[in-house]
Amino acid sequence: MAITLGASAPSTTAHRILNRLVSDRVASRVFARDASLWSDSAQVTNRLGWTDFEANARAAIADAEQIRDELRSAGIDRVVLCGMGGSSLAPEVIARWSGTPLTVIDSTHPGFLAAELTSDLSRTLVVVSSKSGSTIETMSHRAAFAAAFTAAGIDPAERILVITDPGSPLERSARDAGQRVCFADPDVGGRFSALTAFGLVPTALAGVDVRELLDDACAARELLMSDDPANPALRLAAEIAAGLPSRFVLGIAEAPGTDWGLGSWIEQLVAESTGKYGHGVFPIALPRTAPEFAAPPANLIRVRLGASEAAEVAQAGAELTVAASLGAQFLLWEVATAVLGHLLGIDPFDQPDVESAKLAARAVLEHPEDSGSAGKATPIAELSAVLVAAPPKSLRGAAADLPDTAAELLTALQAAVPPGGYLAVQAYLDPSGGSASALAALRDALAQRLGVPVSLGWGPRYLHSVGQLHKGGPALGAFLQLIDTAAPDLAIPGSDSGFGTLIAAQARGDRKVLSGRGRAVFALGSPDPAALIPELIDAVSAWEPVVPEPR
């Protein structure tokens, strides 16, 4: 299996790190499940099943193919996947790689859910994927689809398939409801699960030939477990680590001819694994024409991804190029991320700060009167929005008053980004509402005018990926939330709350945790996000950034 890793100018530091990794036999110890590389905790030992994935993967594929054939004979040929984080991102990439339709639901926006629940259920299988079996978004999706099937005169037990760990609450609930259950390997964490049932079963059910993907990953395994300077996973980890802590952002784009969306999967894998205890590597998935590739900020490393046969990858001009088939890419990045955890002295398999946002959102749901927005909303001139939350003056620069014009808002955002930091746009909007391309243009415009890396995350999807780094990584981020205030609510069966209440609580809960950790968060609420985003782009184009005074 060919894996090509290129570096524009390998540094002395990277060579030194690589030599140490080889002499310490780090690669072979990863595959030997040597938890002492990170910790002596039994929890780490129980998260290394991804290093020996083949047997479980082939069994899961065989089961999925049998179920697929049975369903297709009954006219059921459309697959909807409900999952968050690693449970949805890897299948989404695999489906794009193969050109196979797969509807992925990882949003709680009521408008988005309402449209999906009224789609063609007569030929639909819903896959509910959750390792813990208690993910609030996914459990809400399952309840909503069960009710929709029942209302359509369809037995949910015949149309809902669950992927989860043995013994999880979801397994028990699914068994009680008569729904099919596929088990995942309990020794694999969600974000390392691309080559397990979580990544392979939904896509095999949708019609993807995932055996080819698995074969490529298996062929790469021997190279990636070798204690050799030519091991591309060791080289990748060494190159990234050599830039830390100042160059901690990876701007990841795909080469021409490759359109897998792999950068989004790498975002959650690397950010959630390394972004804790003040450390972190922050990947930002970018279009290949993004401004960062023309004039990268000093804190950003440019990375280009592509297939092994794509000659353009090695000629892309990025500092790092990674050329390999998709199956090999999955395993390569998993190994490199585990090695990065070793180099940073952290456990890459936990996520201590993800739970904080979940608890905060739950608290808002239970006691909305105590949730504390920023007081009275401030209308913003030239924008179809009001400022519903802003950081304290100490985090928004010299302005004494809250911004009430678009230009003042942008100036406050500029001042809030710490030196060497980044801006994260968090869109709690309908991901199918036509705003995706406009938001990408806004991200590009902000990056170009601010001169800093700018990420774009859909809420609450990002909470299960880069949200860990936002809260637990280096305190170098400023945040702009965009919130839809006019979407009609949609009931969650069996709950006192609706999806509109849930998504609002998730935005506010994350805002509360970020603010409590000294991160600057601005939140714009709009009844018309489709109008707001172009207005913001125009405002960015007309705005003159403040030139910092020389020190």
Image: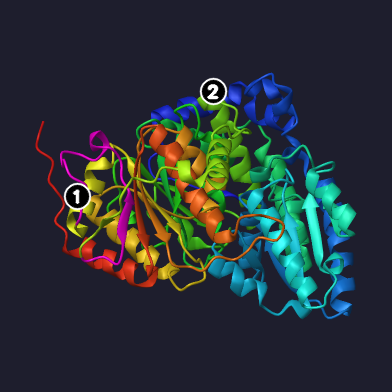
Q: Where does label 2 land, which residue?
A: 345
Q: Position of residue 172 (x, y in %)?
A: 85, 47
The reply, left or right, for residue 137 in relation to residue 284 is right
Which is more toward the observer, 16 or 211? 211
What secondary structure is the magenta-colored segment mainly? loop
Extent of the magenta region:
382-404
Disc number lying in front (2 or 1): 1
Provide the residue designation for mark 1. 411
Name the image quarter holding the C terminus. Answer: top left
Circle 2: element type? loop
Residue 62 lies left or right of residue 272; in this view the side is: right
> Residue 323, how many percent across, how many down?
54, 54
> In the image, what residue type sits under mark 1?
Thr
Q: How much space separates mark 2 and mark 1, taking CA atoms?
A: 37 Å
Residue 107 makes an appearance in the image: no
- The numbered mark, 2 or 1, whose residue comes first in the sequence reads 2
- Point 24% across, 51% down: residue: 450
Q: Give, as a three-letter code, the residue at label 2.
A: Gly
The foreground one among 335 and 473 is: 473
Report the side of 207 relative to 551 (left or right): right
**Residue at image location 81% in from the left, 61% down from the top:** 161
> Residue 243: percent from the left, percent from the top?
39, 34
Using a 10 Å C-alpha cutoff, classify the residue at mark 2 as few (fewer than 14 neighbours), some (14 to 19) or many (20 or more).
some
Q: Where in the figure is residue 395, as x and y percent of width and height? A: 27, 36
